[in-house]
Image (cartoon, helix red, strand yellow):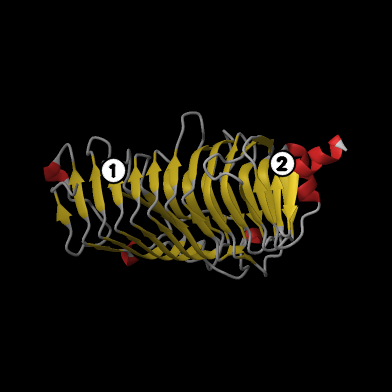
Amino acid sequence: MRALLLLLWSATVYADEIIVRDVTSLLTALRDLKPSTTLKIAPGDYPGGHHVSSIEKLTIEALDAKNPPHFKGGGNAWHFSRCNDLTLRNLRVSGQTGNGLNLDDGGDLANPTTGITIEHVEISDIGPKGNHDGIKCSGLDKLTIRDCTITGWGGQGIDFVGCHHSLITGCRFIGKEGFTASAAVQLKGGTSDVIVEKCHFTNAGERPINLGGSTGLPYFRPQDVKYEAAHLIVRDNVIEGSLCAAAFVGVDGAEFSGNTILFPTKWIFRILQETKEPGFAPSRNVLIKDNRIVFRRAQVQIDINIGEGTAPETFLFENNRWFAEDRPQSSKPKLPVEEKNGVYGIDPR
């Protein structure tokens, strides 16, 4: 009788809601998951290494939002394959050797997984070296990542491969010593129609925002696209430190507007081409406008790093405010095209 009472206390079920209070009841709940279930997890430490496949309308969240459960270690804390309409809310993840969260379409490149929401999730200490991401997303559409914090990762904080019609908003990315972060947000592999807004980046990898990238051809979604990324909007973010603020890498159409850039250490922007297969669009058709850019000429001597195989003449610069703090008279950047209504040498702060 006592054992039965303990079991009922550790995993209480209310219709489609399961309350988990320890590791054993978590594993039991995951084994018996059904669609439209809400899994509420009590405070405490839990192991990583969980895999959920083809469960729709699943919600996994903290029982106490102010004291979230902490998933430690494992290859991935959680791996979700083909889980449409998934919600992850108020969780902590740390110490994974692969990725913090891994979400994908199960390899069905023609049929994306849709409707995922990730919010108020804290992820830290992923990797620390190599291509290991805080949140790895492959083949997802209509994805929202909101108010998350990612601190210390080996590859990308958030990596999109072939994701579309999605939003990253209100997130924080903080780099750490000893972690080989290449980017905070990377959008590649046929990714399109994505907005990155109201985020804060602090020493968040070599390229805090990497619009495009380099993807093996078998991993593009859809398979027939000829760009790494297209139709992207990056707006109203704060980007502090790092080698550059943003890189445009095989992107065909983007807007970078209303952002505040503070003290990049080598370049302000990079225009690059890393996927050079026949027919692929060069980096082109990017509008850079209404940004506040503060830098030091002692560090930034080349404003825009332009690589081969790109189309910098298709970029547009409008209404940006540029300020070299240590040499205001040298604030005007050398751009690939003439800027419209730029302001130089006046502190935009």
**Amino acid type shown at disc 2:** Gly
In the image, residue 53 above or below residue 206? below
Residue at 62%, 62% in the rendered image: 139
Question: Percent position (x, y) of residue 317?
Answer: 26, 62
Which mark, by number, is residue 49?
Answer: 2
In the image, residue 81 above or below residue 67? below
Residue at 45%, 37% in the rendered image: 175
Whether residue 312 is visible to the viewer of this picture, yes or no, is yes
Residue at 62%, 43% in the rendered image: 99
Q: CA distance from mark 1 to mark 2?
A: 38 Å
Question: Percent position (x, y) of residue 346?
Answer: 13, 48
Instruction: Assign a secondary structure to mark 1.
Output: strand
Instruction: Assign a secondary structure to mark 2.
Output: loop
Question: Percent position (x, y) of residue 183?
Answer: 47, 45
Residue at 38%, 46% in the rendered image: 200
N-term-proximal mark, 1 vs 2: 2
Question: Percent position (x, y) of residue 71?
Answer: 64, 38
Pointer 1: residues within 10 angstroms few (<14), some, or many (20+)?
A: many
